[in-house]
Image (cartoon, helix red, strand yellow):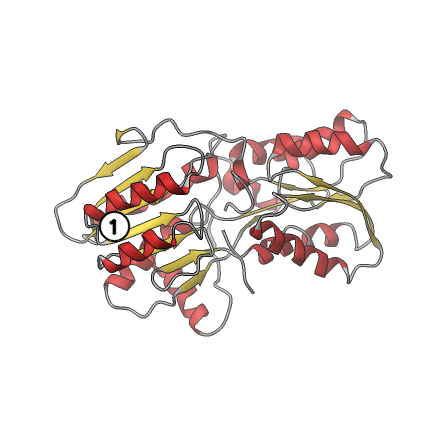
Amino acid sequence: MKLTRVRMMAVGAVAAAALALTGCAGASGAGESTASGSGEGLSVALSNGFVNGWRLTLINKFEEAADALKADGKVSDYTVVNAPGENSATEQASQIRSLILQKPDVLMVIPASSTALKPVIEEACSAQITVIILDADMETSCGTVVRHAYDQWGEASLMPALDAIGGKGNIIINRGVVGSQPEEEFNNREQEILKDYPDVTVAAEVNGFCDSSTAQKEIVGVLGSLPEIAAVPGCIGGMGVVQAFESAGRPLPVVVFDTDGKSLKFWQDSGIDNGSFAALTDPGQAVAALYIATKIAAGEDVPNEVVLPLLQISKDQLADYADLGADEYASLPWDEASVDAALKAIAAGEDAPAPTAAG
């Protein structure tokens, strides 16, 4: 099956209202962090198009993994640079050209645009730099794409809800950024599935923008005219959806929670046990991508596109994420063995398995 990027659908897809980055641990300048090593191993540069809570978790996980690989001699140094502005492809392209001049062995890019940045990606490849494209579906003649699939996310954000309500009842579809390519894949898969559920009625659609506060406002705006609602599947925002139903004095539906610490703690503390769940793209993909870069450098056969599994959390797994910070997002604990297992499955034409322990 085919999926795609984190933070999917949005100008902040997943965490549009989450933490904005003012700097990161160990920063050597505004929006930049650098760690130097002994000169052995790979030099790695990470260019990030914008920062929200999900992206900040991704960067932190990347830095933790890079430090561990430095200790093993596989990485010599790394740099993280966050492009200024609001997800500007022009500014990120300029940033990437500056990184190319530093001649890293590996350039990892989380692109502001999958089309506008293709020329500068090609420039990096021409400079003999190994390019890893993260969290995006980019068609390019070079580089390795490491991503999720939005149609799979659409399925993972709907099927548990349909199972929880027994395949019947009224639902509200909570959409992301309508008109975007990722959201179209996400929603198209939902619509395909719903054709097989004649006893499920879509009572309304709202544009929650994959954001809890926006979802709350949108639900409040339509809820008064709707019958009893069994579930609100779609692009996360579960905490806001619950608050909207509570304020209206309505029975709580099955919802899709975000995977940040604040949302998961809210879910745990509220005691909601009606089949609600969490499903989101995995910021730990940056760790998997870093291991993939080491394998490419070692001459191993790696496919041009690596589609990774989503992160899904059920109520009985909440204790595994009890230590998350409020603005930190849950992630899968990728390591070399789990990346090897994923690549082996992909080579066999199978879906990549997820690591089993919480991260």
Residue 245 seen in the current view:
no
Callout 1: 10 Å neighbours few (<14), some, many (20+)?
Answer: some
* x then y, percent, for residue 137: 47, 56
The residue identified by callout 1 is 69
Residue 263 seen in the current view:
yes
* x then y, percent, for residue 272: 69, 37
* x then y, percent, for residue 154: 63, 53
Residue at position x 19%, y 50% in the image: 103
**SS of the residue at dot 1?**
helix
* x then y, percent, for residue 116: 42, 49
Query: The C terminus appears in which quarter of the rendering?
Result: top left
Residue at position x 42%, y 63% in the image: 305
- Looking at the image, residue 117 sits to the left or right of residue 172; the answer is left
- Looking at the image, residue 227 sits to the left or right of residue 196; the answer is right
- Front residue of this view, candidates 333 and 233: 233
- Front residue of this view, candidates 276 and 191: 191
In the image, residue 202 sits, relative to residue 246, either above or below, namely below
Amino acid on which disc 1 is placed: Leu
Picture mark count: 1
Query: The N terminus appears in which quarter of the rendering?
Result: bottom right
Residue found at the far bottom of this picture: 348
Residue at position x 43%, y 61% in the image: 139
